[in-house]
Image: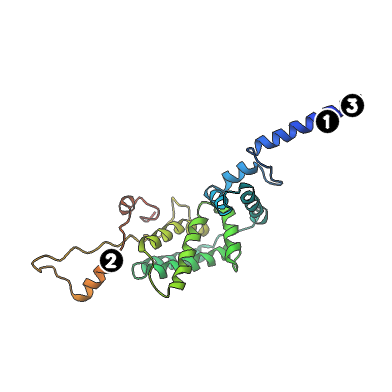
Amino acid sequence: MTVWLIIILIVAAVALAALVYTRAGGGVALPGLSGGPRGLRRRFGPEYDRTVERYDGDRKAAEKDLAQRVRMYGKLRTVRPDAAARERYDAEWSRIQEHFVDSPAHAAAEADRLIARLAGDCGYPADEYDERVSALSVHHPRHVGDYRRLHLLAQRDSRRGGEEPPTEEARTALLRTRELYKELAGRPAATATLPKAPAAPTAPAAPDPAGKAAQPAGERGFGRRLADRVHAPRAMRRGHGPGGTTP
């Protein structure tokens, strides 16, 4: 009787292990996290793929990293700014977008600093960029990658000594990070009221051959600078892109 009891317990243990393996998506179950690797993929979306790429395709190492973030920041208590603070942030974001035409790199750097302050006010780690991004990746995984790109662009600008990066790169980073801004500020994407996001500048028309529409020397120089910029995508110019119109 004792032998049969031992056999039954062994079979039950093997069956339980097989069940855990299957529900984990063929990987290793992660203690304290429901769904195992498959649950991590659902939770982090594109951030899961980015982390796997960061670990050179080592999924176990990437999943360990993501699971650690969930354990550290999953229960982080965050708040949203009150109405007065939100209005101040909206006004500052509006000014940043207005500055974009004159200096895309400077606007990107200003937006990077604003997101850091806003995240800190919401309860995310305020001092260390890496910790802040890790916490944001748990609660805003769909947009944290855009914030990383904006931050990288701002850091590149500080090292360039004022040299402007490609305008389209800066515009795209600002447009996409705008979605994270709206989430942190507590403005649903469908109802947020924010100023129009910057559109890609349009190059001025060529001067008339007869000289009827010739531009002054200063304007010709400005026209050449704008001509180097990339036009916005067609959907964005029609106002259907992210942040292309006032929601």
For label 1, the SS is helix
* CA–CA distance in space, label 1 to label 2: 75 Å
Whole-percent x, y for residue 79 in the image: 59, 59
Q: Earlier in the sequence, mark 1 or mark 2?
A: 1
Q: Which residue is mark 3?
A: 3
Q: Earlier in the sequence, mark 3 or mark 2?
A: 3
Looking at this view, is 211 or 11 the one in front? 11
Whole-percent x, y for residue 115 in the image: 51, 64
Asked if residue 174 lies left or right of residue 119, the reply is: left
Residue 84 visible in rendering: no
* CA–CA distance in space, label 3 to label 2: 84 Å
* Quadrant of the rendering where the N terminus is positioned: top right
For label 3, the SS is helix
Q: Residues within 10 Å of mark 1 (few under 14, many from 20)?
A: few
Total marks placed = 3
**Which amino acid, mark 3?**
Val
* Quadrant of the rendering where the C terminus is positioned: bottom left
* CA–CA distance in space, label 1 to label 3: 10 Å
Asked if residue 245 lies left or right of residue 190, the reply is: left
Q: Residues within 10 Å of mark 3 (few under 14, many from 20)?
A: few
Q: Which residue is mark 2?
A: 226
- Give the mark toward the camera: 3 or 2: 3
Q: Residues within 10 Å of mark 2 (few under 14, many from 20)?
A: some
Q: Which residue is mark 1?
A: 9
Image point 65% across, 39% down: which residue?
24
Whole-percent x, y for residue 17 in the image: 73, 35
- Give the mark toward the camera: 1 or 3: 3
Q: Earlier in the sequence, mark 1 or mark 3?
A: 3
- Are the residues tagged 1 and 2 within 8 Å (C-beta)? no
